[in-house]
Image (spheres, rainbow, N blue to C red):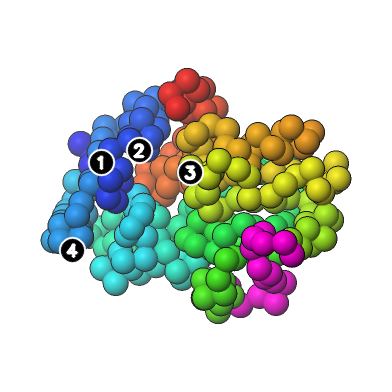
């Protein structure tokens, strides 16, 4: 039996074991996927276990997506641009780091948003999730605007991605809300964790009057954040981050096994489990 799992902290409620173990079973693979909830002191001690022949690799989540990089033998160009790894593949004892978050996001958009070439996409946030999304959007030739509360994370992002199409402006706080920068947007993406705690949306969609606008929140629990509720109340097409979770998992699944995940099967499996 091949072993692997998700490495992180406080991740006992992760959906990844359900996704991967059901996929292994349906594909007839003798693999098992576990939760590795490691404290910082355990992380460096336990990570070398992944080099053993019976480990296929692992996913990496917060707070170790950046911390894991020095422990790996190689990382992909995509992971280098993002500055984070969410997937480790064990190839004959060598640990290779990849990042499937950005491409998982792109695949998730296709069910409700057609074509990114030349489209204006506003990304709220400049943290780890935002970096993966912005990098993928730039690869797909979208015009990207980043909203960041502070400039530090944004500057790190631009330094890695190195694209002049990535712009920034201040967040929507105080009286000088720069909504004119959103009114011609094609897609707005919430890549912050605000929907988990804030009782209001970061954007007042009633001020936009933009019927072509699509909206996506990377959060999938709760299933519908205030951000999505407001978007839908104003007649906009909107979706949460569950499909992104599944698609990034499907890309990792193929890296480990060489087999494609049955994505519709997993999407149906997850319904009612949130």
Q: Which of marks 3 and 2 is nearer the N terminus?
A: 2
Verify CB contact (< 8 Å) between mark 1 and mark 2: yes
Residue 232 part of the magenta-drawn span: no
> What secondary structure is marked by label 4?
helix
Q: Mark 4 points at which residue?
A: 44
Q: Categorize mark 3 by other alpha carbons within 10 Å: few (<14), some (14-19), many (20+).
A: few
Which residue sits at x=33%, y=58%?
63
Task: Tell me: residue 45, above or below residue 55.
Answer: below
Using the image, determine if residue 53 lies above or below residue 15. Answer: below
Q: Is residue 89 left or right of residue 132?
A: left
Q: Mark 2 points at which residue?
A: 14
Q: Which mark is residue 35?
A: 1
Q: Where is residue 96 in the image (x, y as percent from the top left)?
A: 34, 62
The magenta stretch spans residue 169: yes
User: Where are the magenta residues, as a range?
Assistant: 160-176
- Which residue matches tag 3? 197
Look at the numbered disc 2 and give the secondary structure of its residue: loop
Please tell me which residue is depicted at 67% across the width and 62% down the height of the picture. 174
């Amino acid at each position: 039996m091949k072993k692997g799992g998700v490495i992180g902290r406080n991740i006992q409620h992760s959906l990844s074991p359900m996704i991967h173990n059901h996929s292994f079973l349906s594909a007839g693979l003798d693999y098992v996927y576990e939760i590795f909830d490691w404290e910082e002191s355990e992380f460096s001690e336990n990570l070398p276990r992944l080099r053993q022949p019976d480990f296929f690799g692992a996913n990496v989540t917060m707070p170790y997506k950046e911390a894991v990089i020095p422990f790996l033998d190689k990382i992909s160009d995509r992971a280098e641009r993002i500055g984070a790894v969410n997937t480790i593949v064990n190839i004959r004892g060598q640990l290779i780091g990849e990042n499937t978050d950005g491409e998982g996001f792109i695949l998730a958009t296709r069910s409700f948003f057609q074509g990114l070439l030349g489209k204006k996409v506003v990304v709220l946030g400049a943290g780890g999730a935002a970096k993966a999304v912005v990098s993928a959007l730039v690869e797909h030739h979208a015009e990207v605007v980043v909203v960041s509360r502070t400039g530090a994370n944004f500057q790190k992002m631009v330094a890695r991605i190195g694209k002049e199409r990535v712009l920034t402006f201040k967040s929507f706080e105080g009286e000088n809300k720069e909504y004119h920068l959103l009114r011609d947007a094609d897609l707005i993406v919430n890549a912050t964790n605000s929907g988990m705690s804030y009782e209001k949306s970061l954007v007042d969609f009633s001020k936009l009057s933009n019927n072509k606008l699509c909206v996506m929140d990377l959060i999938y629990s709760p299933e519908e954040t205030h951000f999505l509720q407001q978007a839908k109340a104003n007649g906009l097409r909107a979706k949460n981050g569950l499909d992104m979770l599944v698609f990034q998992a499907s890309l990792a699944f193929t890296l480990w096994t060489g087999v494609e995940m049955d994505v519709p099967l997993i999407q149906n499996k997850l319904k009612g489990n949130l």
